[in-house]
Amino acid sequence: GNAAPVSANDHQISGIEQQLQDARENNWDGVANDVGKYADSLLAWTEDYKKKLDTNGAEIEIDVTSFIVNPSFETGNLNGWTADNKTVAQVRSASNLYYKGVGSDGDYLLCNLQTSDSTGVSISQTITGLVPGTYRLSAMLGTDYGKTVTMFAGDKKVSVGAHDFGLFYLNKAIIDNIEVGDDGKLLIGVEAGDWYKADDFRIVCVKLADDN
C-alpha cells in the first residue's frame, strides 16, 4: 500500500473522540438520527486509529514503502538508485530464465553480477520524508551456494546466504529496530561483495518517536 506516515498524537485523538461523543449524545433523536449514526461510525474509526498510533507503547504497522523510489525496479531500470557500476548492476526481466528469482515481485529484478569474478557492486538510495520513529526494512535477496549478500539500513546490516533451492530462488532479508531521526532520512542498500539478485524492498514504521 501507499500509506502515508501518521503524525497525530494522543491529545488530538482524545479531542476528536470527545467531540464525537458530544455529537452522538446531543443529536441521537428522531430528528437527527443520521447525525448520530455518523458520529457512531466515526467513533469506531477513531478507536481503530488509536490502536495504530501506538498509544499504549505497542508496535504498529504502517507501510511506507511508497517513500522508496522504484522499490521493486518496476521501471525496468535503476531509477532512484545509485550503483557503483551500472554496467554490472543491471535490472533484468523476471521472465528470463537466466535471471529468474523465485520470490521476486513484479516483472523485473536487479541482477548484480560482474562475470569476470562473480562479484556484485553496491547499490543505495536515501529515503527522505520519513516521520521520526522506528522502522523495519525487508527485501528479497539471492546469490549462489556458499556466498552471502549484505543489506544495510543506516548503521545496521544483515547478511543472508543462498536459498536452499539454489541461485534461482530469493531469501527474505530483514533489518529491525532502525531509528529515523528528525531529518526524516534513511540510507538503504546492498553492499558490494559476492554477486547477488535483489528485489521487493519494503519499509514499515513500527513505532512513532516519543512526542515527549
Image: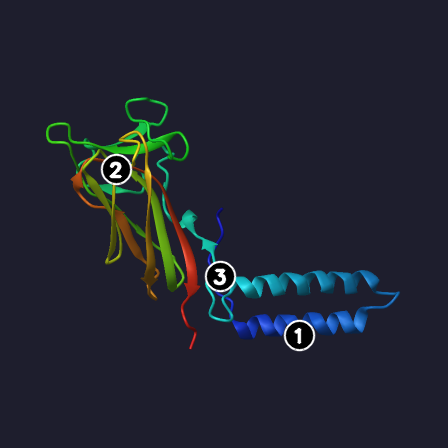
Q: Which residue is mark 1?
A: 18
- Where does residue 208 sit, x and y in percent of width and height? 43, 65
Q: CA distance from mark 3 to mark 2?
A: 37 Å
Check the image and name the residue furthest to the front: 164
Please state if 27 lies on the left or on the right of 163 as rendered.
Answer: right
Q: CA distance from mark 1 to mark 2?
A: 54 Å
Q: Secondary structure at mark 1?
A: helix
Give the residue at x 23% y 58%: 155
Q: Is 209 located above or below residue 34 in the figure?
A: below
Going from N to C along the chain, the mark reached first, 3 or 2, is 3
Count every numbered label the image shows and give the total: 3
Check the image and name the residue furthest to the top: 97
Going from N to C along the chain, the mark reached first, 1 or 3, is 3
Label 2: few (<14), some (14–19) or many (≥20) C-alpha neighbours in 10 Å: many
Name the front one of labels 1 and 2.
Answer: 2
Give the residue at x 11% y 28%: 116
Question: What's under tag 3, amino acid-wise?
Answer: Val
Going from N to C along the chain, the mark reached first, 1 or 2, is 1
Check the image and name the residue furthest to the bottom: 212
Q: Please tell me which residue lies in front, 190 or 56.
A: 56
- Where does residue 103 sit, x and y in percent of width and height? 38, 35
Label 1: few (<14), some (14–19) or many (≥20) C-alpha neighbours in 10 Å: few
Q: Which residue is mark 3?
A: 6
Query: Which numbered dot is residue 162?
Result: 2
Q: Please tell me which residue lies in front, 75 or 171.
A: 171
